[in-house]
Image (tube, rainbow, N blue to C red):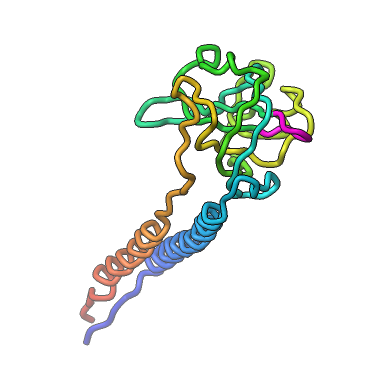
């Protein structure tokens, strides 16, 4: 006569492990749908792009803006790694008719004082690009306005430190302009976030399946004679 003795702790820990792994897989599927929705919004913004269609209050609106280039109030935000090199993104306010818009001109490895932007200070420049409402996570360091050190695009904090009137609630990620800053800026490409969540979900569900297989081979096929 044979019987299978099911170990309590191994069974409990395996069950909890499978639940956690499946929860992670399910979370990745939810993020997959969330990311698909963002990409759909970006696609619609590019498809409906026009010179006068940009909405500075809207997340993901593509178009053109023109205003006074406030190079003396520029800042660098980061760090951001590109091709293995550490740099930062250049942010320059653009004074429009009734508000101020922060414009992301792209990545640079250089210090702020070495950038080819100051000869355009207080001059008209037009940019074309995509609006986006900035966000950051709880691990992002706090900004240090007194030292002009910026780690998160907190529009209200930047506006207060730089004395910018009526800041727009979005950032413009500039893809082109009517003036080339020594061919250095803008250097942003089309905004398309990576969407690898399907692979991540498959990984976590696979790990849950592997855990079940290991448990089955170790305990369910282990026969004890009595």
Q: Is residue 193 above or below residue 200?
A: above
The residue nearer to you, when weighing 197 against 13, is 197
The residue nearer to you, when weighing 39 against 129, is 129
Say which residue appears at 25% left-offset and 68% top-offset.
218
Magenta stretch: give its range: 95-101
Q: Quadrant of residue 205?
A: bottom left
* Quadrant of the image containing the C terminus: bottom left
Question: In x, y percent, where is residue 40?
Answer: 52, 59
| Left or right: residue 196 compared with residue 131 | left
The residue nearer to you, when weighing 116 against 164, is 116
Question: In x, y percent, where is residue 28?
Answer: 46, 59
Among all residues in the image, which is located at the extreme bottom?
A: 1
Question: In x, y percent, where is residue 46?
Answer: 52, 52
* Quadrant of the image containing the N terminus: bottom left
Magenta stretch containing residue 99, yes or no?
Answer: yes
Magenta stretch containing residue 188, yes or no?
Answer: no
Question: In x, y percent, where is residue 67?
Answer: 68, 30
The residue nearer to you, when weighing 109 against 28, is 109
Say which residue appears at 46% left-offset and 48% top-offset.
192
Say which residue appears at 64% left-offset and 49% top-offset.
53
Q: How many marks?
A: 0
| Left or right: residue 161 compared with residue 187 | right
Q: Is residue 108 above or below residue 191?
A: above
Q: Is residue 140 above or below residue 54?
A: above
């Amino acid at each position: 006569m044979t019987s299978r003795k099911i170990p309590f702790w191994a069974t409990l820990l395996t069950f909890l492990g499978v639940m956690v792994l499946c929860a992670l897989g399910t979370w990745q599927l939810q993020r997959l749908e969330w990311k698909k929705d963002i990409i759909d919004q970006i696609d619609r913004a590019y498809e409906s792009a026009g010179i006068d269609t940009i909405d500075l209050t809207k997340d993901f609106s593509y178009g053109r803006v023109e205003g006074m280039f406030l190079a003396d109030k520029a800042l660098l935000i980061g760090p951001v790694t590109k091709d293995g090199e550490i740099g930062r993104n250049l942010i320059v306010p653009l004074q429009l008719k009734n508000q101020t818009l922060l414009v992301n001109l792209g990545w640079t490895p250089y210090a702020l004082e070495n950038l080819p932007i100051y000869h355009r200070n207080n001059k008209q420049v037009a940019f074309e690009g995509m609006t986006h409402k900035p966000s950051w996570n709880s691990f992002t360091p706090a900004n240090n306005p007194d030292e002009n050190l910026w780690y998160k695009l907190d529009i209200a904090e930047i506006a207060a430190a730089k004395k910018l009137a009526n800041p727009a609630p979005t950032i413009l990620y500039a893809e082109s302009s009517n003036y080339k800053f020594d061919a250095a800026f803008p250097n942003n490409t089309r905004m398309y976030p990576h969407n690898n969540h399907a692979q991540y979900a498959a990984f976590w569900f696979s790990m849950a399946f592997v855990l079940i297989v290991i448990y089955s081979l170790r305990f369910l096929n282990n026969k004890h004679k009595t």
